[in-house]
Amino acid sequence: MKMGAVIVAAGQGSRMRSSISKQYLPLAGKPILIHTLSVFASHPEIAAITVVVPSGDEPMVREMAEQHGLGKIRHIVSGGAERQHSVLRGLETLRDEVDLVFVHDAVRPFVTHGMISAAGEEAARCGAAVPAVPVKDTIKIVGADGVVQTTPDRQSLWAVQTPQAFRISLLLKAYKQAGRDGFIGTDDASLVERLGHPVKIIMGDYNNIKITTPEDLEWAEHYLERQ
Ligand SMILES: Nc1ccn([C@@H]2O[C@H](COP(=O)(O)OP(=O)(O)OP(=O)(O)O)[C@@H](O)[C@H]2O)c(=O)n1
Ligand SMILES: C[C@](O)(CO)[C@H](O)COP(=O)(O)O
């Protein structure tokens, strides 16, 4: 089964409140995006990578990848307004090149080969697999009036991460249906769930954070220092 990856890096990073997009911010001296791409490029089973970037950044990212000696990057394309639009643009480039695709946030640099392999093996078996961790806090459903409506049973609550792995034909079908219905989800698996296709959870890692705010970047620097 030929495997590829779509790395989405076309966001603005508004919650980071930084003048440069957060995927390019340095982490231990290297752009966050390069940390992430290095993990995928060095995975023995990944054959092709597409990077989705803000429009106009394609030449800069190509040069950045070459400088860091990253092979396997087949396509660098511009993204869309929502993450979902960016993912779709990336998927279209790999449609005829791979059987199984990983979709991963560029700003999750602590992804490991183990996570990629585990998600890939499960998706090869059942079509769709996503890493997640059990939530540690008690979660409340709160109304617009600020009053708690319910407290769901924590046993069944998981915080979902990337890389999410899919048979590419299944994911493209899910994207087509979401497009027809005008549905925008906050992850890729939710589009597949709408088709009624099972999505298998595999154990993620609490360290596989999405760098979203300045505090996350600080945590990430400390985490790397401890490695
Ligand atoms: N239109 C978009 C929006 C997001 N992303 C990517 O999706 C991942 C997860 O998104 P998030 O962390 O929410 O990034 P931003 O949208 O950049 O952040 P913010 O919501 O703070 O603006 C990131 O790697 C981001 O670059 C993307 O490719 N295209
Ligand atoms: C896909 C994702 O990483 C799952 O946790 C996440 O939903 C993407 O982040 P966003 O802030 O919703 O764009």
Image (tube, rainbow, N blue to C red):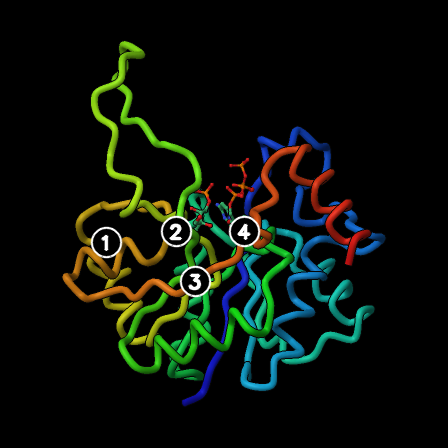
Q: Which label sits on residue 178?
A: 1
In space, the residues marked 3 and 4 are separated at their CA atoms by 10 Å
Q: Is residue 61 above or below residue 39?
A: above
Q: Position of residue 223 (x, y in %)?
A: 73, 49
- Residue at 43% over, 71% down: 119
**If you read the primary sequence from the N terminus, does the residue marked by circle 2 or circle 3 appear first?**
2
> Position of 72 compared to 34: left or right?
left
**Label 3 sits on what residue type?**
Met
Camera-nearest label, 4 or 2: 4
Q: Quarter of the image holding residue 53?
A: bottom right
Locate the C terminus and report the quarter of the image it occupies: bottom right
In space, the residues marked 1 and 3 are separated at their CA atoms by 27 Å
> Is label 2 in a helix, a strand or a loop?
helix
In space, the residues marked 4 and 2 are separated at their CA atoms by 24 Å
Q: Is residue 121 above or below residue 35?
A: below
Q: Are marks 2 and 1 in contact (CB under 8 Å)?
A: yes
In space, the residues marked 4 and 1 are separated at their CA atoms by 30 Å
Q: Which label sits on residue 84?
A: 2
> Is label 4 in a helix, a strand or a loop?
loop
- Residue at 27% over, 47% down: 156
Q: Which residue is mark 3?
A: 203
In space, the residues marked 2 and 3 are separated at their CA atoms by 24 Å
Q: Which residue is mark 4?
A: 206
